[in-house]
Image: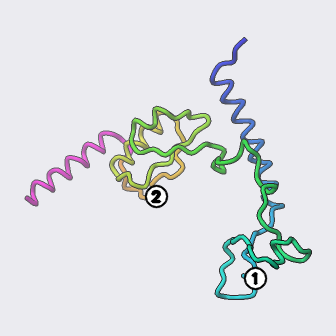
C-alpha cells in the first residue's frame, strides 16, 4: 500500500523536527571557534581563520589551546540548510513562484529586489495558500486586499497624470 504525499510530508516534517532538536543540543556543546591570538591583539578580530604556521600550537592541537574547526562538529544531515523554524527556505521573486512551494515542508522568503506592490501581491497569495513567509514586510502601509491594491494603483496614476 502506497502512502499519500501528505502522509509522506508529515513524516518528513517529524524527522526534521527531531533533527533540529539534535542540532540545538549539539550547538550548545560546540565551542566558539576563534582566530588564533585574537584575544591577545586588538587588531585581530575573532573571525575564524585556519592556523597554517609550521609551529602553530592550535594547528598541532596542543592541550590548553582553543579547538579548531573539524567535520565532527557538523549537525545532522537532515537538519542542514533548514531554517530554525524547520522549513526549507525557497526564494520567491514573483507570484508564480508560490505555486511550486509545498506549504507543509517549505517556506517562502521574498527576494530583496521585489518592490512593495509585488510584495503585497505575494503576501496575499501566500495567505490564500497558507504558505509561511519568513520575511514579511514591517511597514503597516501595505494594502491587504486586492481592492485596496487597485485603489492605490489608481491614486498613483492620477498623481502621475497631474504632475505631467
67 on left or right of 144: right
* Residue extending farthest top: 1
Within 10 Å of the Cα at label 1, are there few (<14), some (14-19), or many (20+) other Cα atoms? some
The span shown in magenta is 144-164
The quarter of the picture where residue 97 lies is top left
Please check the rendered image and state whether residue 15 is part of the magenta-colored stretch, yes or no.
no
The quarter of the picture where residue 132 lies is top right
In this view, 120 is above or below 101: below
Where residue 126 sits: x, y (%)?
47, 39
**Residue position marked by numbered label 1 in the rendering:** 37
Please check the rendered image and state whether residue 145 is part of the magenta-colored stretch, yes or no.
yes
Residue located at (46% from left, 36% from top): 98
Where residue 3 sits: x, y (%)?
69, 18
Please name whichever residue, 38 or 117, is drawn nearer the observer in this view of the structure.
38
The quarter of the picture where residue 44 lies is bottom right
Q: Which is closer to the viewer, label 1 or label 2?
A: 1
Element under disc 1: loop
93 on left or right of 30: left
Where residue 36 sits: x, y (%)?
75, 78
**Residue position marked by numbered label 2 in the rendering:** 138
108 on left or right of 20: left
Residue located at (40% from left, 35% from top): 96
Q: How is the image coloured?
A: rainbow
* Residue extending farthest right: 63
Quadrant of the image containing the C terminus: bottom left
Residue located at (42% from left, 58% from top): 139
Quadrant of the image containing the N terminus: top right
Where residue 7 sits: x, y (%)?
68, 24
21 on left or right of 98: right
Q: Main secondary structure of the magenta part?
A: helix
Element under disc 2: loop
Amino acid at each position: 500500500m502506497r502512502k499519500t504525499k501528505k502522509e509522506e510530508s508529515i513524516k518528513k516534517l517529524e524527522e526534521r523536527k527531531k533533527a533540529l532538536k539534535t542540532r540545538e543540543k549539539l550547538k550548545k556543546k560546540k565551542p566558539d571557534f576563534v582566530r588564533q591570538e585574537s584575544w591577545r591583539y586588538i587588531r585581530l578580530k575573532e573571525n575564524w581563520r585556519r592556523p597554517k604556521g609550521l609551529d602553530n600550537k592550535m594547528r598541532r592541537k596542543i592541550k590548553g589551546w582553543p579547538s579548531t574547526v573539524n567535520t565532527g562538529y557538523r549537525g545532522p544531515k537532515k537538519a542542514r540548510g533548514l531554517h530554525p523554524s524547520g522549513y526549507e527556505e525557497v526564494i520567491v521573486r514573483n507570484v508564480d513562484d508560490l505555486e511550486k512551494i509545498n506549504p507543509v515542508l517549505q517556506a517562502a522568503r521574498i527576494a530583496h529586489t521585489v518592490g512593495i506592490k509585488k510584495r503585497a501581491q505575494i503576501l496575499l497569495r501566500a495567505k490564500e495558500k497558507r504558505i509561511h513567509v519568513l520575511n514579511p514586510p514591517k511597514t503597516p502601509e501595505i494594502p491587504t486586499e486586492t481592492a485596496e491594491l487597485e485603489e492605490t494603483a489608481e491614486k498613483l496614476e492620477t498623481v502621475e497624470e497631474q504632475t505631467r
